[in-house]
Image: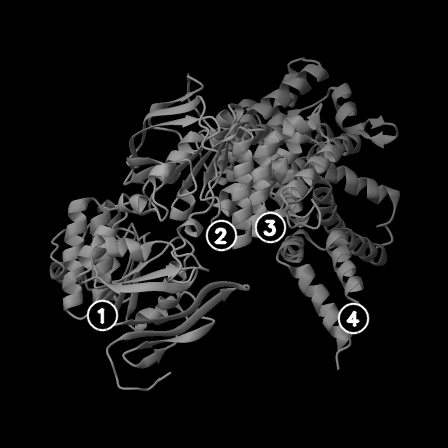
Amino acid sequence: MGVSESVSDELNLVGICKEYLGVRALKDVDLTIPQGTIHALVGQNGAGKSTLVKILSGAESPSSGSVFLEGKELKFHSPIDARDHGIYTIYQELSLIPYLSVAENIFLGELPTRGLLLNWNKLYEQARLQLANLGYFFDVKQNVESLSIAEQQVVELAKSLHRKAKILLLDEPTSALPPPDVERLFKILKKLASEGMTLIYISHRIEEILELCDAITVLQDGKIVSSLQVHGATKNDVIEAMLPQSTKAGHLQSASSELRGSRLGSGKNQDLILSARDLNLNEKIFGVNFDLHRGEVLGISGLVGSGHAEVASMLAGAVKISSGSIFLNGEKTNFESPRDAIEKGIGLLPEDRKADGFIPDMTVTSNTTLASLPQFSKYRIMKTTLENKQSESMAQQMNMKITSVSQSLKTLSGGTQQKVIFSRWLVKGVKILVCQEPTRGVDVGAKESMYELIRTFANSGGTVVIASSEISEALMCDRVLVMSRGRLEAEFSYDDIDSEGKVLLSRFG
Amino acid sequence: MRTMENPINMKSFKLLLSKSYLIIVLLVIIGIGISVSPFFFTSRNANNVISFSSIIALLAIGQFFVILTGGIDLSVGAILAMSTVISALTLRSGLSAEVSSVATLTACAFVGFLNGVLVVFLKIPPFIATLAMLSIAKGTSYIIQSTTLIQISDQRFVKFFATGKFLGVPSPVMIFIVVTLIAWFVAKYTDLGRRLYALGGNPEAARLSGLPVQRDLILTYTVSGFLAGLAGLIAAAQLLQGSSLIGSGYELDAIAAVVVGGAALMGGKGDPLSTIVGVFILALILNIMNLVGISSEPQLVIKGAVIVLAVYLSSAGGVQRISSFISRSRHN
């Protein structure tokens, strides 16, 4: 690798690899981004985008490989280090301090002083100048908490400009913006690029990428699977590039059947079991209607932040609906808590397993029987032998990789933890299982066995809802609802979806 | 050259150390006590320590369950004071010992219940809610007592809670033993115990698994209030008076005992028996310092140091570091 070739103005990534405890997050990523361009980084959850962002922003160091900026190798020890080298990241959750003024936020760490005191006049004046550069003229004395999300982003941008950022990483900056603000943001970003700043833009929205970006890089399973120049490309080309590639299929093999995992449901949709009417959640979900049939596997898909996860939470009582109603077997129900939903036979496999799914210090047995304590106790005393027996039989049935049911959950792999939570609902005997991103963070083998568990559950008369942002998962469902910006965008049945899920992706918007 | 240590021996040694370290600490303290004072290992001294500990032990058991859920109860000392005042007042007004005790315990449990309501429904952090309740309970007992203190002369009351004996055991000690056994049983063998460990270990997972999280939390604070009331009855009977000044600072002793007993303030860890061992570790250290004539100010300093050391050993991975240090020095 030519390390000290001619000095270029590019950002160069050479052979970046990253492993976490033996799990490969990035492998041999080579990427060149010319100065003054906007580069889109796309890929599913767990594809390695966020790892790449972390490496570039100094939050993590690569296991091997190097980053070059303008021909010089960069080695970061911390995010501050990366900032000092001109690489600035704007995360989805903005990192501003709500109770400080706009001006203070922009100049934090380098506030202009006069002697021991702050030079407020100079501070406000410079802050106004920075905002004006971006075409904004709001009050710099007000606290950041009173700003809209769009204005807060502008403050972040002003901050990066003041720090003389050369590279700007933007992680889904439009996910919380209304359309007019998006346009205004794009204008600013284009202006910044034309002035020589290099932007790395993470998004799923095809329209945005077509409008804004110069080139696209698609990551999958930690590797770059395709890249293309946006100039002259059509929407279809972009969709094509973003589709999941079968890892084993070579490019000559048009293995459409291999791309699509085998169907999860039987397709035998019998009688109506649940209907949702005009579901609303403050500022997040707007007027969602759908039906669910016994034995069906229903997918709710969409981008991160599109609202599919919230709809799932509402079904399982984990989040209280603001307005609208859920009819269960024709009867209107109102879930005050997950407890109500569980009583009615609805269980939730939560998205964030670690935060919401299990009790880390408790044993496999205790986690398995957690939702069914009355079933395993008599006169309030736990029947531990019975519990262990049940748990052992579940562990065997699900092929859990454990040495004993008295192992604590925190010592197990993600896939096994997920199986334990699954077994909790089987033991409880729920009728409807609501899964949020059921295979997030589990390895490939465990993924397939999760699908097999869902299949078995659906075949034995259970009903499943899968809220997922993975196309490949949506492709396996009997029916798929597509959500976008909190609204139900489209509905497709299994047979109406092409084997690559283009129709789904085109509605993700 | 390093030699390979038998890994199984090392492992079981580590396990043994982490399991029994509290007992080892207790034994070491008893050993120190025996060596520094001839009075230490006498039945009279033992009686003193245990009677003195009964009150703190009851508070600590209630505190343990609150801490198990990830909360904290700062109001137990004030509830104890309130308990002494209410029992003294009701006894003076001529109520029988039984009626007075039941009324007092009900009132104290109700104050605990209010703590739970503040935490669960008003979503006030436990630290703040119970701090406010400390102030309210203390102020209330001061107002209702209206003089500096109220004497207690009801002999049946005093006998039942202080001077009497059950099966040859002083009654405060008997009460504390019974409560401890119940707490141990509840924590280890009942569905309620299981739910509380789950609630402390991961509240959101507990909620999503359909556990009655709110009800259990309120129950926990109510029990803590009830046990503080019970401790107050013993204190009132021992001191023969009711006063709002009794018990101030006891909440910190109870919290210290729970933490020395290895429970995590984050919740989900610990057990009532270890809490009791924690109570005795602190009580014995105090007792030894008294016997050798250390005055009360240096005692406070030493007590503080002991708490830091104990928590470091039990929760900051100190035991592991020490055992790995031992294994390293054996290798070299």
Q: How is the image coloured?
A: one colour
Characterize the local packing of mark 3: few (<14), some (14-19) or many (20 or more) Cα atoms within 10 angstroms. some
Please tell me which residue is depicted at 83% across the width and 43% down the height of the picture. B46
Which tag is nearer the camera, tag 2 or tag 4? 2
Judge by depth and name the residue closer to the eye, B84 or A366.
Answer: A366
Please tell me which residue is depicted at 64% across the width and 23% down the height of the picture. B105
Please state, as top left, top right, bottom left or bottom right, where the N terminus of chain A lies in the image. bottom left
The type of residue carrying mark 2 is: Gly
Please tell me which residue is depicted at 75% across the width and 82% down the height of the picture. B1
Q: CA distance from mark 2 to mark 3?
A: 15 Å
Q: Report which quarter residue B302 is drawn in.
A: bottom right
Q: Is residue B91 left or right of residue A274?
A: right
N-term-proximal mark, 3 vs 1: 1
Q: Is residue B156 left or right of residue A97?
A: right
Which tag is nearer the camera, tag 3 or tag 1? 3
> Would residue A343 be seen by someone viewing this image from the given angle?
yes
**Which label number is shown at residue A410?**
3
The type of residue carrying mark 1 is: Lys
Query: Do callouts 3 and 1 point to residues on the same chain?
Result: yes
> Would residue A101 be seen by someone viewing this image from the given angle?
no
The type of residue carrying mark 3 is: Lys
x and y percentages locating residue A285 in the rendered image: 31, 34
Judge by depth and name the residue closer to the eye, A264 or A342.
Answer: A264
Callout 3: helix, strand or loop? Answer: helix
**Which label number is shown at residue B5?**
4
Q: CA distance from mark 1 to mark 2?
A: 36 Å
Tag 3 subunit: A
Q: CA distance from mark 3 to mark 4?
A: 28 Å
Q: Give the answer, above or below, for where A1 lies relative to A219.
A: below
